[in-house]
Amino acid sequence: MQENAVRRFAATFVTDTTSPPTPRHSRLRRGRFDLVEVADVIIALICFAITNSALTNANATHHGHHSAGVLVLVAFVDCAPLALRTRFPLSAWAFSAAALIWTSLIIPAGSLGAPDVPVAGVLVYGLCLYAVTVRCRPRIVVGAAAVTLVGAAFIDLSSIPQAIFLTVVPILLGIVVGVRRSGERQLAEQERRHSGERALLEERQRIARELHDVVAHHMSVIAIQAEAAPYRTADPPPELVESFGEIRASALAGLTELRRVLGVLRTGGQDTTPQPGLADLDTLLDSARSGGVSVTATVSGNPVPLPDGVDLSAYRIVQEALSNAMRHAPGSHVQLQLAYRPDALALEISNDAALRAVPVLVASGERAAEGGHGLVGMRERATMLGGSLDAGPAGDGGFRVTAVLPVSSPEEAA
C-alpha cells in the first residue's frame, strides 16, 4: 500500500494531473526540436548568468561570506526549472518554489542589499506557474496559488502584495490561453469529424455514380441480349428459351436490387427501416403546413401501385420542395399536382410570387433538405429512372419544378 501511494504521489508530478502539451505549429518546430523548449533553455541560461553575476557583485560589495560555489548553485537552482516547464510543468513549479525558499534560507533577506530572492528566480517561478495553469487540473492550480501565498509569507510577510500580483497575473494569462486552446482543439476535432463525414459522403456518391453508369448499363444490356437471343435462331429449343428467360429475369432482379442500393448510398443511411412513399404524402403535407406554408395537393388520373423506385423518388422530390418552402419562404403557398398517366407519374410543384425574393424551390443544387439532395439530387433520381426533371422561374414570378417518372415495369423498360 505504501509503495502504491508513493507511485501515485510521483505520478502527480509527471503525467497524472497534466494534459499533453499542445502540438506546436510547424513554424515552432525544427525536426525533432521544439523551439519553445529551446527558447526556455536559452532564457534559463541567460537568467542564470544574470543571477550569478548579480549575486557575485552584491557579495563582493557587501563583504559577504558566501563562497562562489554557493552563489553559482543558488543561481542554478533558481533558473533551472524553466527548462523543464514544457514537459513537466508541475514538477518544474515545485522545483522552482522549493528553490526560492531554499535561497531565502541560504541568503537571508537584506544580507546582500538585494531583494529577498533573485529577480530572475521570481520570473522563472511566474513562468512555471503559468505553465501549471495551462496544463494542470483546476484543483492543482488552486493549490499552487495557495502555496505561493504561504511561501511568500514564510520568506517575508511584507512581500504578500507582490506575491498576490505574482500569483494573479500568471494564472489569469494561463486561464485565457487554456480556454483558447481548448476551443481550438474542439474546432479541430469538429473539422476532422466533418472532413471524415464529407469524405464518406463523397465516396458514397462516387460509388453510386459508378454503379449507375457502369454496372446498371451492363446489366441492362445483358437483359436485352438475353431477351433477343432466342429470336436469332430458327425454332430454338424450349430449354434454350427458358435458360435465356432465367438470365433475363436475374438481370432485371439485379437491376432492382441495384436501385435499392443506390438509394441507400445516396441517403447515407442504413436500409433498416421501410422507405417512405406517396402513401405517406399526407403526413408530409401536414408537417409542411405546421412549418409555416400552405399546401394544396391535387391528384388526377387513376392512382395505381408504383414501383418502389418511382414511389420513393417521387416522395423525395416532393419532400425536397416542401423542405425548401419551410426553410426559405414561410407563409408562401405551394401547389402540388400529381398526375397518374398510363406510362408515367407526372409531378408539378410550384410556389406563388408572394415571397419571390427567396424562391421556395432553390435553383442552386447545393442546398439540400434533410431527406433530399437539392436540385442535383432531384435530377439524379429522375434520370436514374429514365425520366426527366425541369426547374425554373414561372411566368407569374414564382418558381416551378416539373418531373416525369416512368412507371413501366422493368421487363417493359428492357
Image (tube, rainbow, N blue to C red):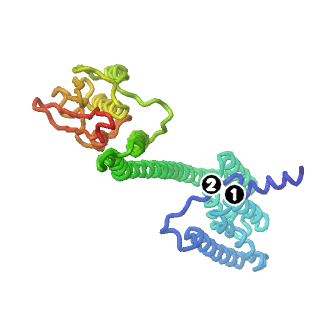
- Placement of 1 over or under 338, stated as above or below: below
Specify the farthest residue to the front.
Answer: 235
Disc 2 crowd, CA 10 A, few/some/many (<14, 14-19, 20+): many
Of callouts 1 and 2, the N-terminal one: 1
Which of 19/282 is in front? Answer: 282
- Residue 7 in the image: state x and y as whole percent: 82, 55
Looking at the picture, tell me which residue is in the foreground, 23 or 393. Answer: 393
From this view, report whether residue 168 is shown above or below residue 372: below
Q: Residue furthest left?
A: 395
| Observer able to see residue 69 | yes
Kindly identify which residue carries mark 1.
90
Badge 1 density bin: few <14, some 14–19, many ≥20, Cα 10 Å: many
Mark 2: secondary structure: helix
Residue positioned 33% across, 28% down in the render? 306
Q: Name the amino acid, label 2.
A: Arg
Q: Are marks 1 and 2 in contact (CB under 8 Å)?
A: yes
Q: Which label number is shown at residue 73?
A: none
Amino acid type of the residue tagged 1 in the rendering: Leu
Q: Between residues 387 and 399, which one lies in front from this camera angle?
A: 387
Q: Residue 360 is drawn in which quadrant?
A: top left
Q: Percent position (x, y) of residue 394? A: 13, 33
Tally the marks.
2
Q: Is residue 30 left or right of residue 154?
A: left
Quadrant showing the C terminus? top left
Residue at image x 24%, y 37%?
Answer: 362
Q: Point out which mark residue 135 bears.
A: 2
Residue 260 percent location from the top left of the image: 41, 39
Q: Is residue 302 above or below residue 35?
A: above
The Cα atoms of the two marked residues, 1 and 2, are separated by 9 Å
Q: Is residue 378 visible?
A: no
Left or right relative to 142: residue 169: left
Q: Position of residue 68 (x, y in %)?
A: 75, 80
